[in-house]
Amino acid sequence: MTSLTMASKVVMWSPGNLAELVVWFAWLLYSECIAVFQRRRPIEERVPAWLAASDGEPRPAVLVTGAGSGIGRAVAIQLSRMGAGAVVIACRTLAEARVVADGIRAVAPEDVVLKPVGVDLRDPAQIALMCEYVRGDEDIRVKLVVHCAGVFCATWRRTEWGEEETAAVNALAGPRILRGLGAKGIRFVAVGSFTHRATSSARLKRWPAAVVGQPPLTPAGAYSCSKAAVAVYVAWARRRWGGDGFTACVADPGLVDTDINREWPPALRGLYVTVARITGLLTAPSTGANAVLHACFDKGATYVYGARGARIQPAAFEPAICKEVFDFLAS
């Protein structure tokens, strides 16, 4: 048994962390109850004209992070099938991105342009290089950024670049991509989570310091805060850059059967998944991707929950704290 496995067992089974997971499930039920009373929104068979392939150059493009597996991969496949002009497939490594691109070519229209890229989203320099590469490609122009990449670290880990890993990937990477590409004229969709509702304003206020300092949060708390930060960033970014044609939305897919909880102790992971399956709340990545697709094209939505495309309100936090979090992410 590795030291990481032993440490994760101790931390993940701690009373504070277990209590947070129970609260998560309560908020999942809340979100499902709100969504069930809304009319199911259909998903169009084709992407809208602003993202569709055309005879003109450059081609409109979507950049999808986390495209190597889970929801990100499902979104990249579906947008390619729907006729997006170009799809930038961002994975942890270039080799992984090329494998995904090869799989998409087998099912997508022949004229779709696929651009596989490798990027470690923990590394600000790699994100900047990816954005420089994409902006320098005269064949495409990014119109849509879909930030699907996400992690759940079962222990507090500082990256080589001095940031807590869950925060770096889930919350900081998306704003860094927008800074690198420029927000003007872009639709930004970030995968959020019902877990953000478990975060209080007081804890969110401590979060920026926790990202670069000591770990005052449980693993579940760090994850919840990262998703709360995503919701705050999206809301405030719309206010800041809306006049430049920028729009944004959070896509909350609900509870999806991906490997994001791969670091959990097997017994805890098995218990959580079993309860989710028994209650019928665990969905496949392809179903979870529907929430993201709704968020991509429903420009009247600011927070979309579930495959039905339900428009619901995110949790509310104190405005002064939201500004602090936004400034931290946008800096």
Image (tube, rainbow, N blue to C red):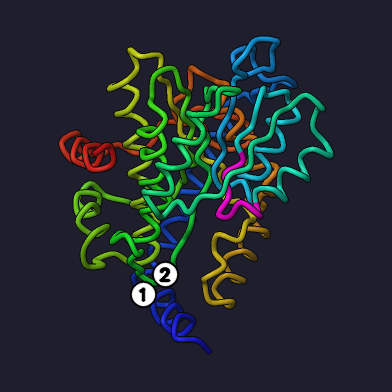
Q: Which residues are magenta?
A: 89-96
Q: Quadrant of the C terminus?
A: top left
- Residue under the image location 44 percent in, 65 percent down: 153
Element class at badge 1: helix
Does residue 69 appear anywhere in the picture?
no
As displayed, is residue 3 above or below residue 256? Answer: below
Cβ atoms at labels 2 and 1 below 8 Å apart: yes
Q: Looking at the image, which is closer to me, 176 or 205? A: 176
Position of residue 262 measured from the top left corner of the image (x, y, whole percent): 57, 67
> Would residue 24 be found to the left or right of residue 46 on screen?
left
The reply to whether residue 260 is visible in this rendering is yes
- Residue drawn at 42 percent across, 70 percent down: 18
Question: Is residue 171 depicted above or below 316 in this figure?
Answer: below
Residue 292, quarter of picture: top right
Q: Please give left or right for residue 224 compared with residue 307 in the image.
A: left
Residue 119: image location, x then y, percent? 51, 50
Task: Find numbered disc 2 in the image and state the secondary structure of the residue it sits on.
Answer: helix
User: Which residue in the structure is indicated by mark 2?
Assistant: 18
Question: Where does residue 205 sit, x and y in percent of width and height?
Answer: 19, 49
The verdict on residue 92 being magenta is yes
Q: CA distance from mark 2 to mark 1?
A: 5 Å
Amino acid type indicated by mark 1: Pro
Circle 2 crowding by C-alpha within 10 Å: few under 14, some 14–19, many from 20 = some
Q: Residue furthest left?
A: 320
Q: Amino acid at mark 2?
A: Leu
Vertical position of residue 275 compared to residue 300: above or below: below
Q: Which residue is mark 1?
A: 15
